[in-house]
Image: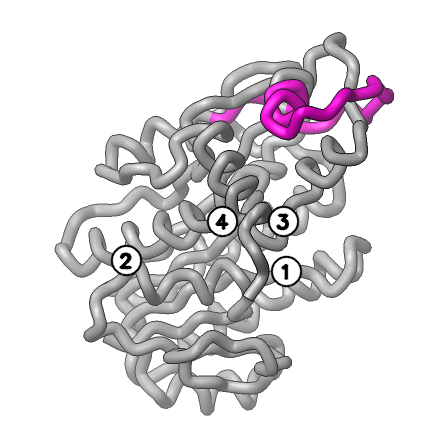
């Protein structure tokens, strides 16, 4: 089983340990200096049509796209998502050997603000930001592309990812930065290890000829207010917080019920298990 990891960053490089050894991984990214052991490097740009045609001569069974913008600008999102999804869809359509599964990683930010309401895969993506609209357009390209009759396309919408190297909130709490209790600001999270495991789970389901939904919301089992999670972290770290105003982002609660219905079991079901593991890791002596 050959798997192409397009945009082979942190999440993608965590996937191999979650799959049996008969899976062979190829990592496509512009810089390969930090590519994990066991992933065959393919140095190149996913938007280079000619190069991508050559890459697909390898004959991949699965393609996983975990792309990130070079910067948080409109142009950055256009290139990373809109342009890249179009280039990928074109390359797959032209490939002699078609993959059986394409997984495109997106974000729950496509939902925009919903004032604390619950959202799931059946809810309309209503974000009006340039980032949300670019993400949604890329999703539509992947889901609508006539890749092949035997090819299944799946979009995975991750919520806020945390884990090793993704410690922004933890760092803020350590610095004593709190937030106000009102208005409520909801936060949806998923540990980076669960991100990789979700992708591996979908790959295994496809190998077992299990039907997959076109979209999955991947978030842990407990949406939480920013106030609650910051104060819980402060208690674990024995620090005092000073409330500071924050922007009212992520005003929604994301449901992972369809992912649970598929049989996925979370490594870190809530922020508590995930952050406790992260805190212990940060306390451990560096090798």
Residue 273 % position (x, y): 44, 32
Disc 2/disc 1 C-alpha distance (Å): 21 Å
Q: Position of residue 245 (x, y in %)?
A: 86, 21
The label shown at residue 166 is 3
- Frontmost of labels 1 and 4 is 4
Between 250 and 169, the one nearer to me in the picture: 169
CB contact under 8 Å: marks 3 and 1: no
Image color mode? one colour
Magenta stretch in the rendered image: 230-254
Element type where label 3 sits in the image: loop
Sort mark 3 into few (<14), some (14-19) or many (20+) by Cα contacts within 10 Å: some
Q: Is residue 234 magenta?
A: yes
Residue 98 visible in rendering: no
**How crowded is the residue under tag 4: few (<14 C-alpha within 10 Å), some, or many (20+)?**
many
Q: Which residue is mark 2?
A: 203
User: Label 4: which residue?
Assistant: 192
Q: Secondary structure at mark 1?
A: loop
């Amino acid at each position: 089983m050959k798997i192409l990891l397009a945009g082979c960053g942190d999440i993608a490089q965590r996937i191999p340990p979650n799959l049996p050894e008969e899976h062979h991984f190829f990592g496509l990214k512009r810089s390969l200096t930090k590519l994990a052991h066991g992933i065959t490097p393919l140095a190149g740009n996913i938007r280079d049509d000619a190069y991508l045609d050559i890459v697909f001569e390898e004959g991949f069974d699965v393609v996983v796209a975990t792309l990130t913008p070079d910067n948080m600008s409109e142009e950055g999102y256009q290139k990373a998502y809109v342009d890249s999804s179009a280039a990928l869809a074109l390359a797959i359509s032209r490939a002699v050997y078609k993959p059986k599964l394409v997984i495109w990683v997106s974000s729950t930010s496509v939902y925009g603000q919903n004032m604390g309401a619950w959202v799931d895969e059946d809810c309309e993506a209503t974000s009006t930001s340039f980032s949300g609209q670019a993400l949604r357009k890329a999703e539509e390209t992947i889901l609508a592309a006539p890749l092949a009759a035997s090819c299944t396309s799946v979009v995975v919408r991750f919520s806020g990812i945390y884990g090793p190297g993704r410690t922004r909130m933890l760092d803020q709490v350590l610095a004593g930065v709190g937030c106000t209790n009102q208005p409520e600001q909801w936060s949806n999270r998923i540990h980076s290890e669960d991100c990789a495991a979700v992708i591996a789970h979908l790959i295994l389901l496809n190998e077992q000829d299990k039907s997959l939904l076109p979209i999955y919301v991947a978030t842990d089992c407990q949406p939480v207010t920013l106030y609650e999670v910051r104060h819980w972290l402060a208690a674990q770290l024995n620090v005092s917080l000073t409330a500071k105003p924050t922007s009212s982002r992520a005003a929604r609660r994301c449901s992972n019920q369809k992912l649970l219905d598929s049989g996925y079991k979370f490594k870190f079901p809530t922020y508590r298990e995930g952050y406790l593991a992260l805190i212990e890791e940060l306390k451990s002596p560096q090798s």
